Amino acid sequence: MPEKQANNPLHGITLESIVEKLVAHYGWEKLGSLITIRCFTENPSVKSSLTFLRKTPWAREKVEKLYLRMISQKR
């Protein structure tokens, strides 16, 4: 099974860590403009964002794609 995850850059990274790193890099305001979801634009917090993202696959996918874009730009 480790072979399946070898090429997955998100393997071993928690959703909480992804959200925290995005907020640290972009800030809530910029993050809310890049991904327009209420948990980023109205009274944002890591906890409320995680609750929403865990229940909403399309939003989680957008967050993961933005994270991958962010880390690829840092290299």
Image (cartoon, rainbow, N blue to C red):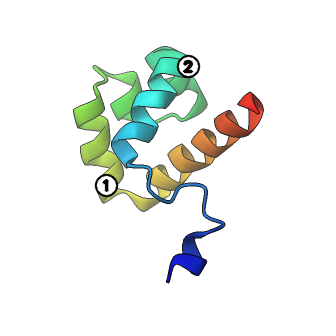
Which quarter of the rendered picture does the C terminus lie within?
Answer: top right
| Secondary element at tag 1 | helix
Q: Amino acid at mark 1?
A: Arg
Mark 2 and mark 1 residues within 8 Å of each other at the beta carbon: no
Q: Residue at x 55, y 20 (%)?
A: 25
Q: Residue at x 42, y 60 (%)?
A: 57
Label 2 or label 1, whichever comes before in sequence order: 2
Which one is nearer the viewer's eye here, 4 or 50?
4
| Secondary element at tag 2 | helix
Q: Residue at x 60, y 30 (%)?
A: 34
Asked if 56 appears above or below 30 in the picture, the reply is below
Q: Amino acid at mark 2?
A: Tyr
The quadrant holding residue 54 is bottom left
Q: Dot 2 corresponds to which residue?
A: 26
Q: Residue at x 50, y 60 (%)?
A: 11
Q: Dot 1 corresponds to which residue?
A: 54
Residue 30: mark: none
